[in-house]
Amino acid sequence: MLRKPVEDKFNTIFSYAMKWCVFAVVFAAPFSKSISEIAISVGIVLFLARRIINKDISLPKTGLELPFLIFVATIIPSFFVTAYFGLSLKALFSKVLKYIAFYYVIVESIDTEAKLKDLFVIAFLSTIVILADGFIQLYGPIPDFLHQYPVYKYRAPNDGAGFFRGFPTACFPFPNDLAAWILLVIMPIACVTIFDLKGLRIRWVVASVSLALFYLLFLTKARGAWVGFAVSCIYIALAKKRFWLIAVLVVMLVMPFFLRMEMANYIFGISSVSDRFFMWGTGWEIFKVHPVIGNGLNSFFQEFMRLRNDEWKGKKGAYAHNCYLQMAADTGLVGLVGFIYLMAAYFVGVGKSLKKIKDKFYESVLLGLSMGVLAFLVLGFFDTNLYSLNLATLFWSSIGVSAATAGVRAGRPA
């Protein structure tokens, strides 16, 4: 049995290391899956080791304990019918339990206002790095400097079809991925810009970053992300009586046509829509096999390859480009309801916390985090952002940071 001073020393060391694991994930997740995966794993191991040393198996109370338990419970029935038990079991630990555990790592390690501010600084620095990467990729002489990704659909000046700058991706492979990341970071930064700009020493830096994020989101032409952004902005406009935000959305939509930008041709293009209809149709066929309990967690890719009806049948899998259809196909209506219940509990908890927070800055950050999560979830109707490793990591981290912010500034639920 460890003596008290030794326990305290270990707790201090573990707390410090866990904090830096969270910092590493928040900073590096957009551009390095390996760094974020290592940091998550180390953070979880330290969290469990700390529990063992302290002989304490309890979890920080955040209000999501029961929703997490129900969410996991609704996934389990799909294991009784899965044809890919190994894939399903691996996904249970690597795509579900891992993120729940890391949520508690964030909540437990970011437990003071000083740590919370440090985390915001780290997140802001990461945002500036990715922004710089996107602008250099789009307007500079080199591609993305983190992964060497070229601009998407770029056409050189000597191309017969004429010069087209293309769509930015920054450190992500596709514009849609960049847009999904922007949704998670632009909302808290924009909310601080709108509601607490006068209280910031670096107010013009924050405002400039907010505008730069908006500009890149506009240039990605990711229509699903635009819808998510619009839904969150409309909610803020109505809740906070900032109706000029709706005018901004209208300008964002008509600007490509007013300026006769080539990207206007892509806004109402149907090629990607027809691809999605094919994927949704196949996804629906997969869902109908076991609509209640699903075909097995993480089975969609394999089932798509088996049931698709084109020349790639039996050769190539795919994702649904609709997170909720894919979730329903994998874990059935039971699993989908479990996830929706978890998200509803999250938003209800944020709403209660916002009423308790008196500080404008933290209220703006928490509102923005939740609106980023909302926009990300709306995008999930049109894309696979919840099934992208780095984007899913940032999504669950946003939920964890929301809980940490509420815990530090509003007090944890009893």
Image (spheres, helix red, strand yellow):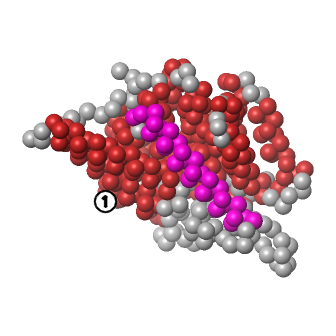
Please, what secondary structure does the residue beneath circle 1 have? helix
Q: Residues within 10 Å of mark 1 (few under 14, many from 20)?
A: few
Q: Dividing the picture into quarters, in which one does residue 160 lie?
A: bottom right
In this orientation, does residue 223 appear? no
Q: Is residue 136 magenta?
A: yes
In this orientation, does residue 141 appear? yes
**Image quarter hosting the N terminus:** top left
In the rendered view, tell whether residue 157 sits above or below residue 167: below
Task: Please name the residue that numbered disc 1 is placed on.
Answer: 86
Residue placed most toward the observer, 197 or 238: 197
Instruction: Name which residue type carries label 1.
Output: Gly
Q: Is residue 373 left or right of residue 162?
A: left
Q: Residue at x 34, y 49 (%)?
A: 17
Q: Which residues are magenta?
A: 111-139
Q: Residue at x 55, y 30 (%)?
A: 362
Percent x, y for residue 393?
47, 50
Percent x, y for residue 361?
59, 30
Q: How many marks?
A: 1
Q: Is residue 377 left or right of residue 12?
A: right
Q: Is residue 238 magenta?
A: no
**Image quarter hosting the C terminus:** top left
Q: Residue at x 32, y 54 (%)?
A: 42
Percent x, y for residue 382?
62, 49
Percent x, y for residue 67?
39, 32
Q: Residue at x 51, y 45 (%)?
A: 395
Residue placed most toward the observer, 92 or 4: 4
Q: Is residue 407 left or right of residue 232?
A: left
Residue placed most toward the observer, 305 or 142: 142
Q: Dividing the picture into quarters, in which one does residue 165 lie?
A: bottom right
Magenta-drawn stretch, dominant element (helix, strand or loop): helix
Q: Most extreme residue toward the left, as rendered?
A: 1
